[in-house]
Image: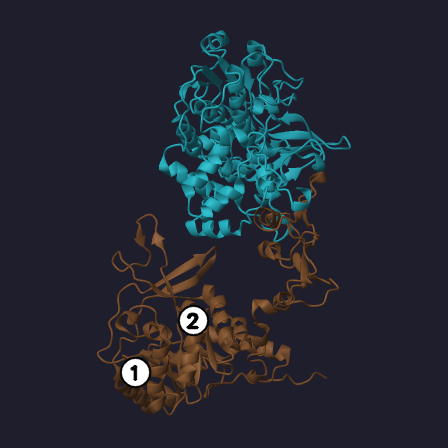
Chain colours: A cyan, B brown
Amino acid sequence: MAPSKRQVDAFAEMKGPMTREEARIESSRCLYCYDAPCVTACPTHIDVPRFIRQIAAADLSGSGETILEANALGHSCARVCPVEVLCEGACVYHDWQEKPIQIARLQRHATDAVHAEGEPPFAPGPDNGKRVTIVGAGPAGASCAVYLRRLGFNVTIFEKRKLPGGLNAYGVAEYKMDQPTAVAEMKFLFKLGCSVVMGKEIGKDVPVADLRSDFDAVFVGIGLSDTRSLGIPGEDLPGVVDALSFIERVKAKGGKGLPVSARTVVIGGGNTAIDGATQSVRTGAGKVVMAYRRGPEHLSAYDFELEHALKDGVQILTNAVPVRICGKKKVEGVEFKDAKGATFVVDADRVIKAIGQTKHFALAKAFGLAQHEDGRLKVNPGTLATSVTNIFAGGDAINGGKEVVNAAADGKRAAWGIFRELLPGAAAPAGNEYWISTIDGRKVAPITPRSHS
Amino acid sequence: MSKPRLKPDLSVNCAGIKSPNPFWLASAPPTNSGAQIMRAFEYGWGGAVWKTLGQDPPVVNVSSRYGSMDLGTQKIAGFNNIELITDRPLDVNLKEIYEVKKRFGDRAVIASLMVPCEKQAWHEITKKVIDAGADGVELNFGCPHGMSERGMGAAVGQVPEYVKMVTEFVKEVSTIPVLVKLTPNVADVRFAARAAKQGGADGVSLINTINSIMGINVETLIPKFAVEGQISHGGYCGPAVKPIALNMVSQIATDPETIGLPISGIGGISIWSDAVEFMLLGSSSVQLCTAVMHHGFRIIEDLNAGLEGWMRRQNFAKTDDFIGKSAPRIVDWKKLNLHYKSVAAIDPAKCISCDVCYASCNDTTHQCIDIDRRKGNRKPHVLQDDCVGCNLCSLVCPVDGCITMTPVDTGLKPLTWEEYAKNGMKGYGEVYRRH
């Protein structure tokens, strides 16, 4: 079957780049708020008014530098960040003319320019003689690597997969960011001088003990593990897939070669379930039902994501607890129980599970790291040090699954934590002051009026 | 039953030159030819000052003639040109003046003139344009670029004695009103205006353009809008110059020596209310160029409509009812009331917490805005005891009507600086807190 027009368009970027004129006009709208709420709302505390003012002043590389100083992953965050609930959601325009500044697209305008220049806008710090290894080349690991290099550490990154980028490369819906963009960002950042070992899994290809002996510190940015199982009969039937594998397949082949589903049921109520559902629609699925076991008020997906799914024609079913996956040789449907206990079956030839991911219990155990009950690694919130000396962690592994921007913030915080741990009392090399000041949000000193002075 | 709508009379009489509305095209590229002016008149323009006529052979112009300055989303906040006077033969222009007047008898056609400072030359050209049917002449003593290097334009306008002399040359032979166009490139425009009056001018038009360089391309280090890598200073105009023009118009309208001298106001007029401002300060006609070059002749439709609607709302039946009405309110600083006090107030219902006022007040002016940061509040408030009423917060606030300047009754009798000084610097009531 030839791809329909819908399918071809479906993978186009939802938020395209801005032209110079668009950026000029949009950046002129920014009010340049004092102690701006958008900066507070950003987990990495990018100085949004400043970078927008730099765009207005036609200083794109300066603008890009402002962004990447505070958030090494600013290039992908511009594409994948849920800005509706972060910076753009905090924009003061909401109280006035309703339409907030398009911060994400402006950010992309600036970082695209820096990427086009080809070199990161900062240099590694002078070698401080310490070696740090990073487990996992996802957003947390990459962010940590950048800031460690700037502080003068020798950095080696181990990544078990073929491509760097973690979920940025494998798990982001295609219309937000394609895989080449994610991988290119990683390569751009690694130009700062990180050794990257691809295709090697710690604890399997490389013993944990080797890391402990060869490196002064370890940063664990391993994300989450496999999608949780439903624990219901029929889960092993062909046609039952987990959302991340499904999205990964869509991304790898642009949706080509994937058998077209007539009816897909996505189980779950979070943002990954939405991605699974919308990507299904975009690969030509005839009908897509997203089923969630609790009431609509408990759906964890962002409102704007739900709207997006509804626009795509996804049917959202709530209070539907899956009890059995039906089918003899392959999936034929899912049996649900509703709030009153009555059962019903939704026909399906594909079932996508999106009910969250499990944690890497085995690796945590191998390192001997203390965990919360739900499996998240326990860390010191200030430095992101784990329970084991000189092992640090960040990203989904400690927060249970948040945004790229949270992982980027963690990487930054951990890099500074590692510096203070390994070089106690040492001053950061020159040129690092700015990003360090953004870790907890820049301290904007209140300006004292006369009556107070 | 509703009253029949009063139709205000938009016509004006500026120094004896009559037109059905006060909007004239200034002497500039839009008035370069009869065909253009006729098109403008079809749209409804009240008058046109022909692009300056000179002696044959006509001048030649350069390639790259205009430059502009954009501000944010505003294209052409300021405009500049290095174009000279008409580059068409005099006979062609005279023939077209005749044709335009024949077709549009009710419109004002004013011939702008510029020839060397010789009596004979001014006599000849004045007679020729009168023969062609012009309603008035405008002596171009303002053009600041190119022609001034040849001893004409602003080179004349900057020397009051020359202004008077050439005005006299023209008045010797002119049977039609003579306007003198003044240059703003002087320390005090009143001297040239007085000279024009002494020379017998029927009125003055101002301002001409201001000496300007539009900028340098910082990538190439070459001046913007260059002629093969070089530029000479040009004449600056457009919305950005309006306050400068209003000041000069008001100076002439209030100078005891020139009070009552008819003025054709020029400088950054883009919309009807700009024109009204010039007229309230004493202009009996206004001239436009930059806004027309930006949007074309069609803008006359909303200029006329805007003026008419305003006159109706204000109950002005004719333009004479309001021309010059605000001029008496322009006074010397020493006449301002030191005991007048106003303070800022921020409407929390309208405030969007951008805190731009907070940063600007405390960093740069009088440090009297505070934010009560309890409970995550970001909305600033004015410490009114410290507020000096400078306006800055209300100027930077992006929200209409959010910050208002409110008069405060101090209970004190008005006191001007003039009186205060006469009083031996006694009697000032300290209406704001000085630090």
Q: Where, quadrant-wise, is the N terminus of chain A in this rendering?
A: top left
Marked residue chain, label 2 = B
Graded by Cα atoms within 10 Å as few (under 14), some (14 to 19) or many (20 or more), the crowding at tag 2 reads some
Q: Name the residue under label 1.
A: B93
Mark carried by residue B139 = none
| Most foreground residue, A201 or A378 | A378
Residue at 41% x, 88% y is B177
Figure check: B22 above or below A145 = below
Distance from the alpha carbon under mark 2 to that under mark 1: 21 Å
Which quadrant holds residue B229? bottom left
Q: Name the residue under label 2.
A: B292
Q: Position of residue A338 (x, y in %)?
A: 73, 33
Q: Where is residue B353 in the image (x, y as percent from the top left)?
A: 64, 47
| Most foreground residue, A422 or A329 | A422
Whether pointer 2 and pointer 1 mark residues with C-beta atoms closer than 8 Å, the reply is no
What amino acid is labelled 1 in the image? Answer: Asn
Graded by Cα atoms within 10 Å as few (under 14), some (14 to 19) or many (20 or more), the crowding at tag 1 reads many
Figure check: B418 above or below A187 = below
What amino acid is labelled 2 in the image? Answer: Val
Q: Earlier in the sequence, mark 2 or mark 1?
A: 1
Q: Is residue A53 left or right of residue A188?
A: right
